Every structure is written in structure tokens, then in C-alpha cells.
Image (tube, rainbow, N blue to C red):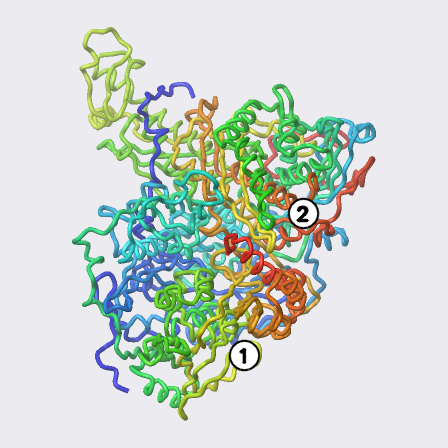
Amino acid sequence: METGTAPQVTVNSEVLDLEGTDPCTNALDWLRSRGLTGAKEGCAEGECGACAVMVARPDGVGGTHWAAVNACLAPAGSLAGREVVTAEGLGAPDRLHPVQAEMAVRGGSQCGYCTPGFVCSMAAEYYRADRRATAAGPGTGAGDAAARPHAHEAPGPNGFDLVAISGNLCRCTGYRPIRDAAFALGFPAEDDPLATPAEDRPSTPARARVDGPAGSYVRPADLAEALQLVGQHPDAVLVAGSTDWGVDVNLRGSRAPFVIGIDRLPELRALERTPDHLEIGAALTLAELERGLAGSVPLLSAVFPQFASPLVRNTATVGGNLATGSPIGDLAPALLALEASVVLEGPAGSRVVPLDAYFTGYRRSVRRPDELIRSLRVPLPLGRVSAFHKVAKRRFDDISSVAVGISLHVEDGVVARARIGVGGVAATPLRATATEAALQGRPWTERTVRAAAAVLREEGTPIDDHRASAAYRRAMLAASLVRLWAEGETAETVHA
Amino acid sequence: MSGVPTPSDDRVVGRPLPHESAALHVTGTALYTDDLVARMPGALHAHPVQAPHAHALVRHLDVTPALAVPGVVRVLTGGDVPGVGDAGVKGDEPLFPAEVMFHGQAVCWVLGETLEAARLGALAVEVAYEPLPAVVTVREAIEAQSYQGGMPRLERGDVESAFAGAAHVYSGVTESAGQEHFYLETHCALAHVDENGQVVVQSSTQHPSETQEIVAHVLGVPSHAVTVQCLRMGGGFGGKEMQPHGLAAVAALGATLTGRPVRLRLSRAQDMSMTGKRHAFHTRWRVAFDGDGHLLALDATLTSDGGWSLDLSEPVMTRALCHVDNAYWIPAVRVNGRVARTHKTSQTAFRGFGGPQGMLVIEDVLGRCAPRLGLDPAELRRRNFYREGQSTPYGQVVRHPDRAVTCWEQVLETGEVARRLEEVAQFNATHEHTKRAIATTPVKFGIAFNFTAFNQGGALVHVYKDGSVLVNHGGTEMGQGLHTKMLQVAATALGVPLDVVRLAPTRTDKVPNTSATAASSGADLNGGAVLNACTQILDRLRPVAAGLLGCAAGDVVVHDGRVRADGGADDGAEDASLTWAELVSAAYVQRVQLFAAGFHRTEGLHWDSSTMQGSPFKYFSYGAAAAEVEVDGFTGAHRVLRVDIVHDVGDSLSPLVDIGQVEGAFVQGAGWLTLEDLRWDETDGPQRGRLTTGSASTYKLPSLSELPDDFRVALLQRAHEDGAVYGSKAVGEPPLMLAFSVREALRQAAAAFGPEGVAVDLACPATPEAVYWAVEQARGGSVPPGLEAVVEGAPGVVPDQPGPAAPPIEPASEELVPRPGPGA
């Protein structure tokens, strides 16, 4: 294929050559090998954020914005044509960036190892174009504490969304000074070079190819070219955000001689609403989808904040989450409840597979090696009663012990249609069909809910493992329906 | 402290300064050990061959296939060791083991041109193992009587009589979990042989001197042939006190054998599977109260999970036994300690060093017994506080017990706890599925190494001719702000502006024979030494200044870089002054020594581990915390709504640093108690003994979502501590134990789902699942899975009592203590 010009990336305003980089070399190691040792490896699996850097990404309205991403998971080759800023590029000890200054003077760093990553995540939020000052920050309201949102869920007085830095771990500070630094930030100056609307920043990297001694990273320009490459390279690995494969490379020694980046394929980036369904492009990142849906699918709105971390959501894609086929992926239970279908694209054309027929076993699916996931199709209208309940040890950025997606069509007080997807209780995500049957046609009452909860408790084949006991998982299945009912009745806050 | 000028009010110590490296941290320009690799061309990379068994004999090891892998340079095995092939100081940690003692133990190391080559080489090494039975849990170890090291007993009063006459006796079992340090920077060492033949090791170590000693004994060379430097660490928390040594030794061995620099950096997975953690503890106890809820007696046997080798398990146990009282007066005490030998990583120091595990016992006891005694838990705690004149079970007078009371009362007052308790009651009455609670707990923590000999520190202070000052000291910087404090101490002691003083990295060729930067004692010991060095220099400069100013040497005052006469007659002499640089320059010309080695030993300490009696601590640090939590009745999920803390750091050397330590320790403690969940494969399957939560995706430490919504930390005022550096107290460890307030609040919130006064048993860590089972118990269910019910009634279930032949702890560090003869 044509490679065009030599693969290059702009890092801290300097154009650097990527040629000679292996597809299994991640962006973090590559940056560090270039002397940019600010970004650190803390876990090598996208869980700690010590490697976070800022990457210019399309903002969906013609410009770009800064997205913080985990450099440890991205193949270095995937940076081709992009613009990257690291902590070193934001400022220097004698001219600190506003984010760096606030972090420094407020005691936001102790050992300092996580700090460059925090600074990048914080700076990306600092530059968020629609960040606006709010009338009152958290903790300033008087009266019943129950009425106040929890601190990490409410934006600061400067509109700073703390969730933006929730994918960064700090073992020293306890986070309070970091929160204070975030909330003390002002807004970018007019002449801040990183804040300018960046039409001229590379937002849609063209096709690229980076060849190293052990293999190649190739980013095709469109779907046809991608399918052709897949046909030519049966051993190729397809990556979008690489948030799953990157972990395999770093922790389990996975290697591939040919890696195809499909995250920029235009055909995979649609987000369209027709009268009878919603079409979600497989290469949309979770963050893009969240912005694009703007709350129009409440069930998914409940998933997004609990799906990994923003550092992961900025690169992980909808299609990737289904392609990995994990039994504990958070999207599948929700999409099962939404009765989504998977649109697969192969050399012979496309086919549509209902999601409940898509998974065939542990990390296995009906997708053939020469097929790509093009999109997801969610039928409309949506059920009026819905919920997503994720049970995990930690509220942010943890893997589910149990995840339950529920969508109910209640008509005239009767459950006309019930769809329930569950994760974490079997080798694949499941539909809780017996529970659905126990609900459908019955009056939407507590009695029905309690009876159905008893059925849901017995769905799947949960096991004891390091995340939870089987007994707890069963209890959580049952509790999810009861909670849905109770919260509908009492309007208590949904517990994340 | 004689000769130290009294600092004026605008002295540099006590200022709330940011971390001295803050500007480097935030710009990514602060260098850590692994950042140096790029500056060392030709460095080789080391990768371990990790055993896939918890316990096995290495029957055969063939490295030749690895040598065929392109880029592999050498494989290090036991035969390569010229000196002593042991990674520890007790002779029980073979560097290249013939018997695998835990899942993931390194049996040999591959050196490659790249890490990838070394990794592939490690995969190619052929090892034949003969698997052996493995002891994985503490309970299995107790069952199998698998112990190691000494079995100390700490005893006071007539325990049996106290139980016989008590109004209330309860017996139970308390287990606390281990904890992974999860310093963000994993272990790392970079070794090379310099142009002078010196072995130089850059190491992420809290104990450079011991790293140096072990590198030297592995290489079979004297200590003077090895230099260890620690620039800074990306977190330590005790995990880099003993554990870096073997890794540094492997790197140094590789460097001496190949003549090339060797970098050894553990991946997170390797770090978690190979290095030690906080000890889990199993404690069987019985406790006696009088009719008013006063503690009468505690009889407990604490068994720690030591892992495969002793490491620091004995001193950790000693500190645990010395802290079972926390802030409470217990007239009769008998506590036994023993270290289980299990086939796991060798558990080690972790912030608090056994103190948290010891204190957890009494806090768990009080939390479980309060409802049974019909008392509010806070009232039960407050009623049992130490009073003036009382002593700890090991015989140390409890000085300043009123400070615990002051902290406690201040927290209740500034936290408006009485009002908020009413709000909580109201909330609980109107919310069926969500309950809240506020719990208050105290901390009393002894400061100093239990073992007296470690309580010494050294420093080297240079004043150059231009007046600039360079400070070396024996402590290491791991984020705790030690270097910041040392800069403040030096600037204050010399009377110069902060920017005149620069701090050099910790190196064993500058300050030798240092103690670990541990036991919260870094600022006490090294601060004392820096102060001592500065005082020596100033004492030499004072006559020079007196000559220039025409005053008595005793009237010379140096402050903020100005030197003047003070205290003399009001004759305008104070107008006569010179600059610090002028004074230094003049002193040089007069051939006055402008540098000094400082030394500090903590006075007044003594400890006899054979009787477990003495006054091992310089002072006690006090604090109190009130935590409000909310529990979700559907899942057991919980959050911390508000935390109020008052903590005693003496006169703070550096308030921003100290508040950061209090907050960070608290959140780390809350992580240990409510979230972090170490699990090993306990099945009989082929993976037995493997750490199943050995990664950041499976082992969850607190994230921003665990930050209390409202977090208010105050330092106790008017808290000067005599005999410590500028009246300051240690801060690193004690506040971690303030997190018991969170655990006890969770217990109380779970109880709020049940009838008034219901007693609740809560597993540790109190994960959402554990809290869920506690809620179920409160609602009338059974005792949570894995826990034992509390037994009521005298004489109670008597814990195991090791026999008279139980081995004593025999630390080498106590040579100065006269040992009693046999039968003494």
C-alpha cells in the first residue's frame, strides 16, 4: 500500500520521526526512549494514569480538543499524524503552566511519580471548550447533606469535572490537594497556544504505516482498504483504542507482526438516529458516544461514568468492547437490555446479528476473522423504565462483580416487554430470559418485582473469585430489580 | 540542643512550603531511578525467571536455550555469586533459590540488550520443578504449626484473676488483611562499575546503607567498594525498606560480571508477585470489662502471616504487641506473638509497621463489644483512655495522655459531631435503603525504632566559600517531604534564606551507616543530625563574626542571611552587620572549617526484647478522627461523607507537608480497611499460592472516588515536644490508624439496618461485599461468611499460649542491651 510521507508525530511542538518503531512498542516506551521521561509506567495496563499524555482529537464539530490518554496502551505507531503534549511540553520549572502551578503550590505532589500524568489529565479538562464557571461549587450548599451531590460528582466552581482525573491514581496525597488544585484553576488566556481553536491541528490522521524490525502498524484510510488488509494478513491484529490488546502486549507478551488501526475508518464512526433505530459506529470512543448521545439513552448514560476511566473512555471504542467479548465488559449487559444488534462487515458484505446471539463462549463470538464490527443498532423506542447497576469494590474504574442492564416497556401499569442483560455471572454476557418471562404480562408492582427478583437470583452460573463470592453475586442480581423498584418509588439517588 | 539559637517567629521551619521538588514533579523533570537508564548508554536489562509453584524444588535449570535467543547476553544463576548468595541479613533469603518458596519467586535472571530480549530469554530458560505441599493461609499455618523466628510475649498483671472476677467477658477472633504498597514507582535498580572500580548502584531504596551492605556481601567485597545512591522514590511506604536489596544485588552482580550497566526494573505484575506486603494478622482474643465498661484484661495471641522468610516480621510483631492498647488503659494484659511461615512473598514493613494490626485488635474488640455492653462505642472508647501517670503494658509511662483527650474533644467540637449525630438519626429514620453513621476513634502511636540501636542519624553539611550550603543527610525522599523539612531545618539553624541551601541526593559515600528512612523517624533522626552539623559550623563562625562586629561571640545572631550583634548594649551596635557570605568568606581566610559531619542519637531509649519491657519510644503521637459514612443496603457499597481529624505533630516543621502526610496516611489506611483486597489462590489446583489480585486491574487502591466529600484536617496547636527538632513530632505513620474511624462507622451504619443495639461483625477489608454481609447480619442473618461469632462468658476461649520453650526474638541490633543470663 501507499505509505505517503514518513510517519511523524508532533510532540510538544517538535516533529519526531516514528519510522523503525515496532507495532508492539507502546507510546510510553517510545516517548521515554526519546528522553521524555516525564510520563511514567505505573501499571502498564491503563489503570493508574501515570503515563497520561494529551493527544489532539476531533471534537465532532470540525475542530479538535485535547484528550488525555494512557500512553502505555497505545501503539507508538498510532500516534502517526497526531499531536501530543506531555507534562514537559506544558511548562518548565521556571515557567509553570497554570495547572502545574496549582498542583505545586497546593501540595498536589508528594512523591511526584503520578504527577505528570495527573497534570496531563487536568490540563485536558482545563482546556475543555465548554467548561464554564458554576454558581456554587460542591460543599457550599447549606442544609441537609443528603441534598448535596457527592464531591467527586459535582463540578467545581470553575466547572472542572473531577471525573476527568478519576483515572489517575495517587498513593501519597489522599487526593484532597489535587481536588483543590483542580477547583482553583482559572480559564486559559487568550494567547494560550494550546487553547486556540485548532482547525489546523491534525484531527483526522490520514492513512499511515510505521514499519519496525518486528512488524508494522498500518492505519488504512477506509473500510474497503481495511477489509482488503484483513484478507491479506490473516495474522493481523485489529486495534481501535488498543485498550485491551495493549494490556495483552504489556502483561501477557502478546505480539503481532501486523497491526491494523481501524479507529479512524469513517464508515465506523457514524452516529445516526432513524425513526426505528439508533446506529452507533463501532469506532466511536465511549467518550465520543457519551457526548454524541447527550443523555438521550438513559440506560447508556448510566453506563458511561462507570465504564473504566476517562483515560480509557477517550480511546476505547464501542466495537472494541464487544470484539473482546469479555464476560465482564460493561457495555454488553446494557446493550442486551436495549436489544441491540451487531452489524458485521466482511468481504462478502454485511450481516446483522442480534447481540444475544453474538457471544458464543468465553471471549468468543460469531464474528469471523475476516469481519469487522461496523456498528451497533439499537431499536427505538426505548423502554421507559431502565437501569444499569454495576457492583464492584471501587466506585470509579473497577471491573464488575455483577453488572445488570434493565429495560422495561410498561404500558398501563403492565410490563409489556422486559429485557435484562447480565454480566459477571457466566462465561459470556447473558440475557436473563427467565426473569424477563417472570415480568412480562404482569402488573408493575412490588409483588411482581419481588417474584422476578427471586428468578433473577438464579440466572447464570456465578462463581467465587477474587472479585466476589457466588452468593454475593446472586444476592446482587436479585437486589438490582428490587433497587430499580425502590428507587422508582422513593426517588432516592441512584447509587453508582 | 545546647548552642542552638532560638529561632525568631519568622524562622524558616514552620512555614507551609510546597515540596522542594514540586516544580520538578509537575513538569515531569524530577528524575527517578529508571529515568536514568537513557543517560547510561549500553545498559543491559534484567528479567526474572519466575517459578510457577508456591513450593517446589528446582531439580534442573538449563540456561543454554536462553543464550541462543538474540540479544541475550548472560543468565545470572547461583553459581555466579562470588560472595554470599543471600538477599537479606538473616541468612534465610537465598538470592537464587534451590527451593522455591512462593509462587513467582525468581530462580534466575536473564540479561539482555533490550528488555524484550531478556523477556524472551527468560521464557527460554528450562527449569524442572518438583512441586511440594504449600502452606498458603495463616489458618493453615496455625493448623500445621508452621512458624518462624521468635515468639515474644508481653505481659502485665494477673490476667487470670482479672478474667475470673470480671462482670463481662467476651472471646473472639479478629483477622486483618495484608496490603500491597502499590508505590506508583515499582522497584528499580541501575548498577554500573565506575572508572575507579567502584560499584555504583542507583536504587529506589529506603535503606541505602543496608542495600550497600547486601550488595557488598553478594559481591564478596567490603562496603567501601559499593556506593548506593537514591535520588528519590516514587513512593515507599515501607515496601522499599528491605525489599530492594536483592534486586540491587542482582543488578550489581550483572554489572560486575558483564562490565556493562545493568538496569533491573520490576513490572507491576512482577513487583506484586515478588515483593512483600503488609502482614495479615490472625488474632484470637478474650477481653474482660467491669460493669461500667472499663477494660480489665486482654488476653490475645497474634499470628502474623510472615510469608516465606523472616524479613522484618519480628520487629513488626513487636510493634503490633506494643500497640494493642492503642490509647486505652488495660490493667491486665497478656499478648503473645508468633510469625507464621507461609509460601507467599516475604511480608515486610508497611506504614505503621505492625502498629495498625495491633491497634485493629482493640478497636475491633471495642466495636463488637460496645453493643453487648449496652454502651455507645464512642463512650466506651472515651471511658477507657489513658490518664496521667499510667503506663503501657511494656512499662513506658504514657506522657501527655491529655493530648489524646484534647484531640478527641476538639474533633467532636469542630466537627459538630453532636449535631450531626442527630441529623444522622433523622436520616436513618427516613431512609430505608441507605444508612449513615459517625464513628470517632483515637490514635496513640510510639515514635522511635523499637530496637534502640537504629535510633541514630547522620548528616554532612558543607558551606562553600560563597556562602552557599550543601546538605547531605542519611534519610531518603519518598514523597514524605523529608528533604523539604531538612532544608528548612538547615536554613533555620544557620540563619540563612532557604534558597542558600541545596540538598544533595542520598548517598552512602556521603553519610555512612544510616538507618532506614522508616518508623516515621526520618525528620527526627536526620533533622537532629543536620541541626547538629549546622550548630557546629555556626559555633565556629560565631567568634569570627564577633571579631568583625566587635561584640561577644554569644551575642552574634544570624538571621535571614544577615549577621549582627544582638543582646548587647543599646549603643547602635545593631546597625553593624554583615552578610552571611561576607562572614563565610572571612572565616575561610581565617582557616575556619566550613563543613561538618552531624550526628544524632535519640536519648533516653531502652528496650529489652527478652522481657518485652522498656521505654522504646521517644514520645507518643496522638490524634483523633470522626468519620461519617453512608452505606447502601442493596449492595453494601459505601462512601465517606465527611472526616474531621485533629492530629498531633508537635510544632510542625512544615505544615503543608504534615497535613499532606495526615491526609495521605488516612486515605491509605481507609484503603487497607475498606477496599484493598489481596487474594491468593487457596485451592488445591495448579495455581495454588498465586496472587490472584496481582495487578492494578484486580487490586484496587483508593481513587479520587474514595476521597471524603468533606475532609478537614487540623494540626494540634501548642504541641511543642521537648527534645525533638524544633519541637516537632513524627508524622508519617500515626495518621494511617485514624482510618479505624471509617471501619467503625461502617460497622455502625450496617447495624443501623437492624434493631437498636444490634452487634455487628465486620470482615477486614470492609469491601462492599463484606459490608453487605454485615448488613444482612444486622437484619437478622447469620455471622458474615468467614467470621467467628463472639462468645460471651468467663473464662472465655483462651488463646493458644506458646510454651516456655518458645524461641525469643534475638535482634542483632540489641547488642548494647545487657542480656539476662539463662533462667533470669
The chain identifier of the residue carrying mark 2 reads B
- Where is residue A437 drawn, in percent x and y? 63, 74
- Where is residue B93 drawn, in percent x and y? 60, 54
The chain identifier of the residue carrying mark 1 reads A
> How busy is the neighbourhood of tag 2: few (under 14 within 10 Å), some, or many (20 plus)?
many
* Image mark for residue B175: 2
Total numbered labels placed on residues in the image: 2
Q: Residue at x 72, y 49 (%)?
A: B780
Is label 2 in a helix, a strand or a loop? Answer: strand
Describe residue A386's horizontal placement relative to residue B492 as left or right.
right
> How busy is the neighbourhood of tag 1: few (under 14 within 10 Å), some, or many (20 plus)?
many
**The quarter of the displayed image where residue B9 is located:** top left
Look at label 1 and name its amino acid: Asp
Q: For mark 1, what is the residue?
A: A356
Task: Estimate the spatial distance between the alpha carbons at disc 2 and disc 1, rounded to whole Å.
Answer: 44 Å
Quarter of the image with the C terminus of chain B is top right
- Where is residue B514 drawn, in percent x and y? 47, 39
Q: Residue at x 43, y 35 (%)?
A: B658
